[in-house]
Image (cartoon, rainbow, N blue to C red):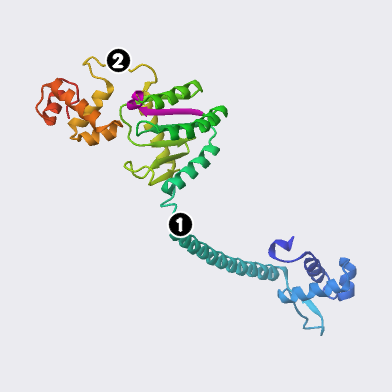
Amino acid sequence: MLTMLGLDTASEAVYRILLAHPQHGVSAIGTATGLPEDDVRTALDTLSELALTRPSHEDDGQLRAVPPELGMEILLARQQAELAAQQQRLEASRATAAQLIAEYADLRPRAASPGVEQLVGLDQIRDRLATLTREVTTEVMTFAAGGAHTQRGIDAARPLDQQLLGRGVKIRTVYQDSVRNHPPTIGYVEWLTTQGAEVRTVPTLPTRMIVIDHRRAVIPVSSDDTAAGAVVLTGQGTLTALCALFDSVWAGAQPLGPPPAPADNGLTAQSMAVLTLLAEGHTDESIAKRLAVSPRTARRLATDLIERLGARSRFQAGVKAVQRHWLPAE
């Protein structure tokens, strides 16, 4: 029972016998406890070291057990001292571990803050995505910003997509409308839908993004150079917001198929996006990047809208669009 206080079984048995029979010597203690004399002597040495026995004032050479109330106080004080020492060792170990982690982070920085894992370079991004893909269990949601895929990218993605869909993983992907004009990409996207994936398109996307199982999101550090670096986000609040963003964009996106009919004002979704960007003051190059089209196409779309509105400048086009209720008044 006293083992919790640091007293071994044999020493506890000897201590109890000494309390009950103060006059017992080694032989009598051995008989009472069933311990060999050597074990009794070892136990007596332990009790002496713990200050649970003291020399008798009446019988020279005899040991007396200290009263239980004093003995328990001694054992508790000793245990508290050991706990304090252990806590000091723990703090020292924690400091050493923190220093090691800090030194390692200097050599190979990965996490800028809790819930953020940094990936530097295309190799790290691809390796981490491969790991995350193997771990996915329920759903992958993707913003495929950037327009058309390369044939090399399509060839690399097909077996991965097939594996995920074969495992019952749900895939939802939002592409930009511009892919509808790129035969290799639209062929790949149509193949995806035949395999069970869901695909929709919108004129513009806020960023490239992959959300895995609603628990991890991978987004590029820079939209201008998505291969330079990315971050893996795992914070619950961040993931909740990103999933809500995806669902909002998904709800307003068009399913793959024939292009949607123009609105009552005759504008397609892509034209409306161009008009909004014009009103915000974007250049042709900026519009092209956001729509994932060539600068020439962006220039043609912008010119057509300006002429249709009878405007002499981009600013005036924005004003006239508001007057016609094509754009909301701010």
Give the residue pinned by disc 2: 261
Toward the viewer: 304 or 134? 304
Magenta stretch contains residue 102: no
Instruction: Tell whether 21 sits left or right of 215.
Output: right
Q: Is the C terminus in the top left, top right, bottom left or bottom right quadrant? A: top left
Residue 161 on image: x %, y %: 51, 30
Placement of 265 over or under 147, stated as above or below: above
- Residue 108: image tag: 1
Residue at left offset 50%, top offset 65%: 95
Residue 57 is drawn in which quadrant?
Answer: bottom right
Toward the viewer: 159 or 151? 151
Residue 295 on image: x %, y %: 24, 33
Please name the amino acid that badge 1 sits on: Arg
Residue at left offset 73%, top offset 62%: 3
Magenta stretch contains residue 177: yes
Instruction: Tell whether 78 sits left or right of 165.
Output: right
Q: Is the N terminus in the top left, top right, bottom left or bottom right quadrant? A: bottom right
Residue 328 is drawn in which quadrant?
Answer: top left
Toward the viewer: 44 or 64? 44
Placement of 222 over or under 152, stated as above or below: below
Residue range highlighted in magenta:
170-181
Residue 187 on image: x %, y %: 43, 23
**Residue 79 visible (yes or no):** yes
Tell me which label, 1 or 2, sits earlier in the chain: 1
Residue at left offset 18%, top offset 23%: 304
Residue 40 on image: x %, y %: 84, 72
The kind of secondary structure element at disc 2 is loop
Task: State how far apart marks 1 and 2 are (Cα).
Answer: 52 Å
Instruction: Tell whether 273 sits left or right of 74.
Output: left
Please name the amino acid that badge 2 sits on: Ala
**Residue 322 visible (yes or no):** no
